[in-house]
Image (tube, grey):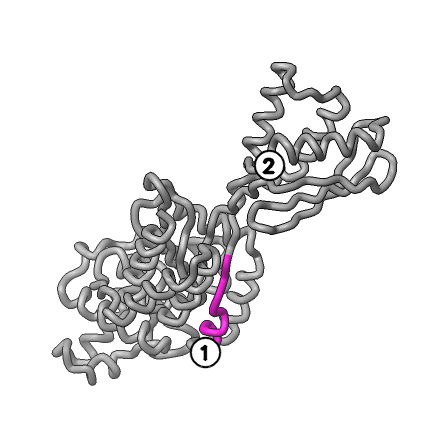
Amino acid sequence: MQSPSVAELNDRAREVFRQIVDAYLASGAPVGSRTLSKIGALGLSPASIRNTMQDLEELGLLAAPHTSAGRVPTQSGLRMFVDGMMQASEPSPDERAAIDQSASGSPAIEEALVRTTMVLSGLSHCAGLVLVAKQEMIIRQLSFVPLAPGRALAVLVGADGSVENRIVSLPEGLPPTALEAAANYINGRLAGLTLADATDRLNAEVAADRAALDAMTAGAVATGLAAWSSDGAARPVLIVRGQANLVESSVDLDRVRLLLGDLEDKEELVRLLELARGAEATKIFIGAESQLFSLSGSSVIAAPYRGPGGRVVGVVGVIGPTRLNYARVIPMVDYTARTLSRLVA
């Protein structure tokens, strides 16, 4: 059954539903008619509230967990609330200052991303997430260490001082001198280039017969560069911080255990966040709208951030229980994304 829109609810149903969602998001507990009548803002008797709650349940917007007399919003109900009824509140000056400071507190971009994710996690009481495109390494030096016939260890040193190793298969019959010649060519002609640019230059020079390499040595150079090309320059790196907040803020530890298990599936989580890359605004995934969180009943709020030329370079967000404070957290994630965009632009 398709859930109704906000416009299809009468004033009484709309206000009862709003009060139930607000109370549920604040407490995490089912909300009963007696609780709503005590609030007093509705001006309705418990019997009238119960009848309206029953109508909302029949519409698929509320559900009664177990044998409780109270009701909780369903996933469809939360979606309707977020899309059509929620009144968002901008981050406070203190919250904006904390996010700004975390983003500007370190000269290293990755460290700033980690710091900002931790601050966002603390402010939202959720786990913070940031997805950043892996920066392609710039070659400083590449060397080969022979291991056995047809195999060698390729050692790549990046311009940032990072070191990565790969075991590579070599052309059959390649003499040891060719490995040395290949390393000399790479370090003399290709240092300072990205792997992709280095490969393009090698291909161009070989095609123009300017590489001064024999075929076997050229093959060794190509093999050395290709050892890293399969990584993909754009393969994203996922940073997760603040998982402990999920435990501290939850009233349902069984769901938290499921969620923490879901967070271990980084590949699926990356795929989910990738869906937010093309979004113009913040994306909200509630409960089973994402297959990954169909059991844990969690929500993800994510927004893309942009680099030079407005190109999307990553995604920042939070993950928490479906009863998180959407009105507060959604603008907070949006502000963080805009802050990171200024940082990396």
**Residue 39 pos. (x, y %):** 19, 82
Above or below residue 243? Residue 184 is above
**Three-letter amino acid code at disc 2?**
Ala
Residue at x-position 31% and y-position 63%: 332
Tell me the magenta residue range. 239-247
Q: Dot 2 lies on which element?
A: loop
Could you say which quadrant of the image residue 199 lies in?
top right
* Alpha carbon distance from label 2 to label 1: 50 Å
Queried whether the magenta region covers residue 218, the answer comes back as no
The one nearer the camera, 170 or 277, is 170
Mark 2 and mark 1 in contact? Answer it, CB < 8 Å.
no
**Nearest to N terminus: mark 2 or mark 1:** 2
Q: Is residue 121 left or right of residue 330?
A: right
Above or below residue 120? Residue 206 is above
**Residue 286 pos. (x, y %):** 39, 58
The one nearer the camera, 66 or 166, is 166
How dense is the environment of label 1, judged by Cα within 10 Å: few (below 14), some, or many (20 and up)? few
Q: Is residue 69 left or right of residue 189?
A: left
